[in-house]
Image: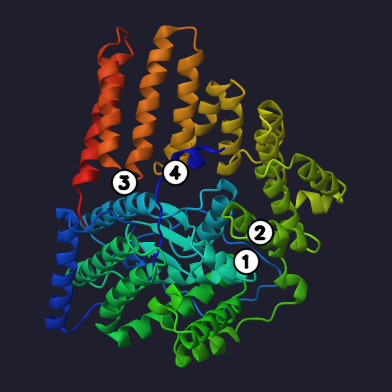
């Protein structure tokens, strides 16, 4: 069982997150009323009337989130874009340093609350695949990497962005898409909103929108705690979004059309098919019409991104300006999407064994997912049979399944406590793809459980430096140090490992929004460090003191 399964098994997770593109209001009286409503909800949460810190909502959307330096994919089928990508100048029109810092704090607060209150899809391979696509799209418009890319385990169609650089997507969006291009169209739309700073209309308007949306989101979380069906939470959330959107619906429509237009350009430059955007819009529109007939709530994305007939027509017309792809070109990402679709189904337990077995007759992705499913069900003979079948594939077809095939094989071995064999399978892939986060995490788990925790630490520490919010890496580091503490022949090294295990646990608790627990872990680590009679105690104590300060700052922050 991976560290996240152990950590979140007893948590009550909930996720009625709805994406919302906020709009500034020109009607000052109505804006003030909405602001006071948001302040009331926030103060209710702060005073304990509403009972939880919550996952942030899409309504925190669109600020300062960007990509790393992934370069645009070149492709022989792609023709020159007929429109220039119109992005805001970073000189003179950008945010002030104070606003950038404030957005960073909001982004961190958002991420901590998302982790603490939403059911997440933590599978490292799924995360790596979605992150790579997101960063590639972001790289066309921005230079700064996202603060975090999160995947919410929820069947509704939704994606969101929050100030400071948090980008999120629901598993329902993956499962509703029919191609990687359609999935990319949703993320590209969000990237376009961010690049145009639609959220940052001015300090006062931005704060008004934030209060409205955060207040509604917190109320929705509170409602969902007493409504397992989720309709009450959806109703509360829909009401708060309607309030924000109605402030200036004309401005919202303008933003949506602009995000569609720029999103298509971003897709084209990143090597995805812009024509996929209106196709996916049509899918969402059909679902929304079905929901209206059945008196159900609209999909989250439709509620916060109104799909008017005018907008759909405009998107379809604009998409016609891009070249039509051949069937082979349209399917260039299909093998990867097939793996992503069925892996998401299996890890989220959104599919039955019967459905997987039927799909595996025609889908290699479903066959790999079925092997994973058999491993989780302790049906090792059938899992081995599938692995044997996949081993007989031609080399090119088999290589197209990597590294997921080796990861799945290692997981089946891990379920049998064959950790050394699992590590050998993963090490071969890790040598080929040393930069991949998912391989480092899976391999570190195998090394820790095969009594090689020091080697596991070497793999994990760079991940926490690259992404301080990486809870999976922090939990894996904690487990590695607990193993060192138990097996080290040196009492001094065992003591330091125990202290570090507490420190790493506190980082996980911090990014899970459990501030008091993080402070407790660090207080324990500090007490143990003060008892050390080693030269290493002083710098270690300084680190712990700074970490305590960081947690207190995060705990005290309120947007």
Q: Position of residue 269 (x, y in %)?
A: 57, 69
Sequence-first tag of 4 and 1: 4
Sequence-first tag of 3 and 2: 2
Residue 432 visible to an observer of this rendering: no
Sequence-first tag of 1 and 2: 1
Q: Disc 4 marks which residue?
A: 8
Q: Disc 3 marks which residue?
A: 513
Q: Position of residue 382 (x, y in %)?
A: 79, 45
Q: Position of residue 202 (x, y in %)?
A: 21, 71
In the rendered image, which quarter contains the N terminus? top right
Sequence-first tag of 3 and 1: 1
Q: Residue at x 49, y 60 (%)?
A: 139
Q: Is residue 512 above or below residue 251?
A: above
State the SS at label 4: helix
Callout 4 touching callout 3 (CB < 8 Å)? no
Q: Disc 2 marks which residue?
A: 352
Q: Is residue 516 left or right of residue 436?
A: left
């Amino acid at each position: 069982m991976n560290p996240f399964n152990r950590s979140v098994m007893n948590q009550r997770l909930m996720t009625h997150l709805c994406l919302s593109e906020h709009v500034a209001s020109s009607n000052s009286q109505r804006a003030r009323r909405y602001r006071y409503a948001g302040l009331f909800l926030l103060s209710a949460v702060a005073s304990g009337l509403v009972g939880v810190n919550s996952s942030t909502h899409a309504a925190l959307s669109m600020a300062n989130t960007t990509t790393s330096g992934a370069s645009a994919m070149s492709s022989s089928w792609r023709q020159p874009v007929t429109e220039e990508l119109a992005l805001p100048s970073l000189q003179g029109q950008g945010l002030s340093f104070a606003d950038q810092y404030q957005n960073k704090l909001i982004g961190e607060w958002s991420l901590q609350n998302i982790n603490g209150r939403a059911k997440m899809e933590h599978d490292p391979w799924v995360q790596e695949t979605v992150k790579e696509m997101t960063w590639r799209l972001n790289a066309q418009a921005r230079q700064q990497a996202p603060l975090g890319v999160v995947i919410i385990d929820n069947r509704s169609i939704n994606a969101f962005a929050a100030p400071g650089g948090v980008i999120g997507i629901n598993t329902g969006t993956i499962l509703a898409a029919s191609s990687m291009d359609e999935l990319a169209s949703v993320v590209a739309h969000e990237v376009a909103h961010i690049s145009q700073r639609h959220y940052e209309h001015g300090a006062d308007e931005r704060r008004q929108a934030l209060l409205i949306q955060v207040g509604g989101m917190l109320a929705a979380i509170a409602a969902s705690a007493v409504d397992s069906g989720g309709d009450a939470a959806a109703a509360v959330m829909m009401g708060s979004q309607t309030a924000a959107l109605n402030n200036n619906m004309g401005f919202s429509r303008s933003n949506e059309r602009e995000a569609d237009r720029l999103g298509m350009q971003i897709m084209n430059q990143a090597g995805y098919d812009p024509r996929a955007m209106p196709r996916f819009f049509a899918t969402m529109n059909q679902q929304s019409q079905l929901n209206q007939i059945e008196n159900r709530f609209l999909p989250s994305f439709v509620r916060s991104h109104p799909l008017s007939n005018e907008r759909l027509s405009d998107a379809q017309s604009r998409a016609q300006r891009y070249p039509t792809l051949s069937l082979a070109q349209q399917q260039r990402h299909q093998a990867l999407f097939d793996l992503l679709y069925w892996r998401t189904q299996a890890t989220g337990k959104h599919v039955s064994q019967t459905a997987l077995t039927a799909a595996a007759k025609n889908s290699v992705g479903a066959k790999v997912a079925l092997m994973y499913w058999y491993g989780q069900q302790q049906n090792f003979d059938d899992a081995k049979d599938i692995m044997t079948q996949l081993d007989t594939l031609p080399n090119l077809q088999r290589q197209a399944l990597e590294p997921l095939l080796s990861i799945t094989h290692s997981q089946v071995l891990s379920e049998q406590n064959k950790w050394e064999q699992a590590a050998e399978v993963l090490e071969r892939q890790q040598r080929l793809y040393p930069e991949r986060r998912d391989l480092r995490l899976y391999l570190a788990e195998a090394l820790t459980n095969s009594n090689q925790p020091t080697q596991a630490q070497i793999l994990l520490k760079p991940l926490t430096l690259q992404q301080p919010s990486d809870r999976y890496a922090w939990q894996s580091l904690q487990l590695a140090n607990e193993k060192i503490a138990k097996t080290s022949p040196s009492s001094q090294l065992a003591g330091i490992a125990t202290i570090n295990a507490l420190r790493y646990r506190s980082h996980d608790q911090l990014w899970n929004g459990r501030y008091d627990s993080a402070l407790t872990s660090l207080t324990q680590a500090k007490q143990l460090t003060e008892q050390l009679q080693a030269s290493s105690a002083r710098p270690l104590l300084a680190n712990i003191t700074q970490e305590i300060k960081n947690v207190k700052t995060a705990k005290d922050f309120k947007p």
